[in-house]
Image (cartoon, rainbow, N blue to C red):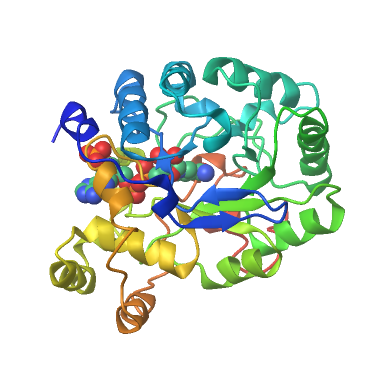
């Protein structure tokens, strides 16, 4: 099905989409549209999907400066509002890229995203990764920046102070983290004046991150789940032979058959029922991905069966952000329960 076919399909009432309440009392739709074209879907195709998705009922869009399409997406967001959808009905997220952590760069970078997206404010602005490590677009996983650094909490907090200033300035309604771990989040929660409202993290049936998921909720944040269907279109550089594919899992396939929906829809239903906010990317299936959360929920048995599928299989390992030769990607994720020493 192409974009045009999708956008003519029946409208899904946004009021039928579950909402997440943030600690500020604001509500965020519990399904959003991802906008990372994975290096093979063009900015114009993504922008077209944003328009089509709004036309079928999406109100939540997950953007980022590094996706290289905020100008095109911004034109769609302007058109959407011209078609009668009010700004306050939309939830727009953007993210600060790794090369803009410097104290003088944060506000300027947010202003650039706002200008590109043609918005006066963002609902949510995230620090995309907790490392200030830059790598050239499209590089392979063996690429390392000579200036790459480990997580340095004092440096992160300097960036965070600027994020807090964005809230004070009214440019951003909420701020949040992404790709964090429990030990890093503990320090940020201890030191933040304005606490993160969300943590965006990889979440799908083969990578459920139960401890971090619980930690995020227990601390009054919302977990936003990226790669919710296992990112079947991710770039080659993000693939390794051990990677699992949740949409090919026999348990998911069987549940999909029982409900008469796609395996992707099962992953999205599971995500919403579990309590995270999935942000599936799609230029072809976005309507199905929204409609599936409005009816025919998974049963408790099915939820339990999917809970048992966790394989701790991280797909987005982040190798390019490593700071030392010979390191394994696990160093980025504090797998020993403490921040990996420099
Ligand atoms: N914070 C971070 O560091 C971070 C990292 C990664 C991603 N993200 C965000 O998360 C979003 C989602 O992640 P992702 O794009 O990597 O992975 P994903 O949403 O798990 O997978 C997207 C892929 O699945 C296909 N697809 C979607 N719905 C489908 C359906 N119902 N049936 C069959 N195929 C379907 C899409 O193809 P079609 O287009 O053909 O439908 C696309 O190739 C990104 O776009 C981005 O906004 C954030």
Q: Residue 8 at what x, y percent from top left?
A: 20, 31
Q: Which residue is drawn at 26% across and 57% down?
A: 265
Q: Is residue 259 above or below residue 181?
A: below
Q: Position of residue 58 (x, y in %)?
A: 39, 40
Q: Is residue 144 left or right of residue 191?
A: left
User: Where in the figure is residue 42, as x and y percent of width and height?
Assistant: 31, 22
Q: Quadrant of residue 150?
A: top right
210 over 224 or under it: above or below: below
| Observer-nearest of 107 and 61 | 61
Whether residue 327 is visible, yes or no, is no
Front residue (pair 100, 55):
55
Instruction: Residue 184: tell me if it is visible.
Output: yes
All told, the count of numbered labels is 0
Farthest residue to the bottom: give it: 301
Residue positioned 61% across, 42% down in the render? 129
The residue positioned 71% from the left and 56% from the top of the image is 23
> Eyeballing the image, is 62 above or below 224?
above
Residue 272 lies left or right of residue 175; in this view the side is left
Q: For ligand 1, give the image quadrant.
A: top left
Specify the quadrant that holds the N terminus: top left
Residue for point 79% across, 21% down: 104
Residue 320 position, x and y percent, is 50, 39
Residue 45 left/right relative to 97: left
Asked whether 206 or 251 is in front, the reply is: 251
Describe residue 9's horizontal placement relative to residue 45 as left or right: left
């Amino acid at each position: 099905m192409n974009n045009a076919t999708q956008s003519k399909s029946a409208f899904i009432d946004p009021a039928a989409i579950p909402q997440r309440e943030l600690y500020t009392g604001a509500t965020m739709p519990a399904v959003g549209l991802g906008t990372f074209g994975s290096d093979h879907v063009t900015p114009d195709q993504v922008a077209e999907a944003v328009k089509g998705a709004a036309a079928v009922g999406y109100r939540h869009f997950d953007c980022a400066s590094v996706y290289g399409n905020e100008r095109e997406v911004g034109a769609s967001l302007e058109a959407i509002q011209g078609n009668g959808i009010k700004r306050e009905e939309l939830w727009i997220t953007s993210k600060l890229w790794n090369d803009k952590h410097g104290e003088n760069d944060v506000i300027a970078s947010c202003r650039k995203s706002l200008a590109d997206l043609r918005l006066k404010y963002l609902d949510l602005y995230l620090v995309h990764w907790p490392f200030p490590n830059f790598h050239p677009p499209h590089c392979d996983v063996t690429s390392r920046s000579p200036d790459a650094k480990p997580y340095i909490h004092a440096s992160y907090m300097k960036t965070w102070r600027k994020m807090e200033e964005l809230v004070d300035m009214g440019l951003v309604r909420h701020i949040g983290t992404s790709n964090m771990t429990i030990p890093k989040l503990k320090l940020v929660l201890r030191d933040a004046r304005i606490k993160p409202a969300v943590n965006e993290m990889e979440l799908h049936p083969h990578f459920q991150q139960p401890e971090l998921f619980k930690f995020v909720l227990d601390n009054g944040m919302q977990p936003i789940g990226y790669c919710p269907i296992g990112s079947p279109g991710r770039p080659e550089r993000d693939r390794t032979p051990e990677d699992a594919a949740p949409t090919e899992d026999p348990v998911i396939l069987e549940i999909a058959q029982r409900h008469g929906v796609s395996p992707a829809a099962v992953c999205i239903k599971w995500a919403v029922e579990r309590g995270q906010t999935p942000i599936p990317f799609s230029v072809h299936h976005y309507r199905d991905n929204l409609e599936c959360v409005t009816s025919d929920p998974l049963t408790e048995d099915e939820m339990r069966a999917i809970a048992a599928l966790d394989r701790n299989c991280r797909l987005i390992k982040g190798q390019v952000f490593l700071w030392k030769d010979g390191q394994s990607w696990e160093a980025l994720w504090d797998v020993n329960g403490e921040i990996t020493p420099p």
